Image (cartoon, rainbow, N blue to C red):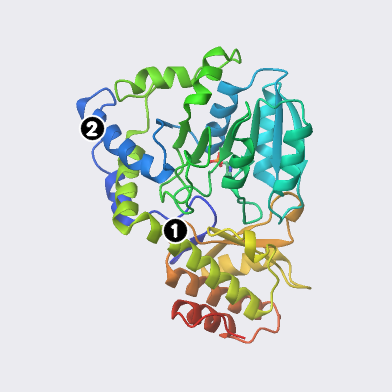
Amino acid sequence: MQGKHYLMIPGPTSVPPPVMAARSMPVIGHRSEDFVKLYQRVEEKIKKVFQTQNDVFIFTNSGTGGLETAVANVLNPGDRVLSLIIGNFGERFANIAKAYGAVIDEVNFDWGKDVDLRLVEDKLNSGPGYKAVLVTQNETSTGVLNDIAGVGALIDGTDALLLVDGVSGVGGIEIKADEWKVDVLVTASQKAFMLPPGLAMVSVSNKTWGVIERNVSPRFYFSLPAARKSFANWNTAYTPNVSLFMGLDAALEMMLNEGLKNVYDRHLLLARATRAAVKAIGLSLLVEDHCASPTVTAVYAPEGVGADDLRKVLREEFGVTFAGGQGILKGKIFRIAHMGFADRMDIIIAVSALEMALARLGYPVELGVGLRAAQKIFLGEGEVA
Ligand SMILES: Cc1ncc(COP(=O)(O)O)c(C=O)c1O
């Protein structure tokens, strides 16, 4: 595409210059002393993001590979699993477990809603004794944030392991892996970590290791015991993407320099401004305030305007890419990401482009009304009527 482009999808997200620079450093050998130092630096920093004392393993694959790592190392055929599904990625996590022969008890919540903890409690009380509970921290397909602390508190004290897909949350939304009793936490490079796709990060609790050692499912590239063996020498079992490791080092440095609380607050602010703007324009949000994602906002296309037609105008005329709907929401919603290397002026661009694209498609938008709502939030003047 010609001209300046604004990538506002929930992954891959745009990559900041210091991360690009780090990634274009000369490649180093992965069995070198330099790599040892790099992994040590990355590990020290990433544990702060995960808020864990456990090891965080870094694999060269996408987020789905990270989820498969969790499943392949924990679940055997016939194991009973509780899958909490609020959208497309909850379904994917369950499907991976199915592929490994687990027997899935699915609890499906309406797309756009979060997990209802009362139902989880009922299931845990009446269920067969689950080996694991699978849940998505931030459901990217709908822009819903789940209460992982709440799920963790319910599972604490049971034998079940809590496996969390944090692919589009970790790094942009606070998570306390240890305090919230998350046994395996998975995330990936191309979302809030501001990197291109290619790395998955996976933390593993002590409670999980006993299960992993006894596990008989086939695993090779995704073997956590193999990863742990190499990790003892600050290494990876197989050749890692060293350039992405260098980028991750720089991205983590940026995040810690900004301050993690500031990073999380920034995401919350951007979400709040986006939601206020969308409402002011007169469009409907998919998700209620109490469980709205800080990293991605889903919006219904208005009557008479196709979500994908709108996205086409945004992309082709204004150089702005929003994501479309997935699964049952395909063609009905569009999603605006404010994830990773995103700041207030990105929202101003997104809202401005949205208003113009709506006007172009004949929707009666009062130009500037959404912008004003976002600006008010950024000026600390609260929501506009
Ligand atoms: C919540 C969530 N889980 C899993 C994935 C899959 O990750 P990947 O596309 O990196 O395999 C995504 C990707 O969008 C996601 O948002």
Q: Residue at x 45, y 77 (%)?
A: 378
In the picture provided, is 207 more to the left or to the right than 230? right
In the picture provided, is 6 more to the left or to the right than 305? left
Q: Nearer the viewer, residue 362 or 180?
A: 180
Q: Residue at x 41, y 47 (%)?
A: 195
Q: Which image quadrant for residue 123?
A: top right
- Give percent across and percent down for residue 348: 48, 75
Does dot 1 land on a helix, a strand or a loop? helix
Cβ of disc 2 within 8 Å of ligand 1?
A: no
Q: Nearer the viewer, residue 357 or 269?
A: 269
Camera-near label (2 vs 1) is 1
Q: Quadrant of the C terminus?
A: bottom right
Disc 2/disc 1 C-alpha distance (Å):
28 Å
Type of residue at label 2? Answer: Lys
Type of residue at label 1? Answer: Tyr
Q: As drawn, which residue projects farthest toward the front?
A: 157
Q: Which image quarter has ligand 1?
A: top right
* 338 is higher (above) or lower (below) than 250: below
Q: Which residue is mark 1?
A: 264
- Give percent across and percent down for residue 355: 60, 78
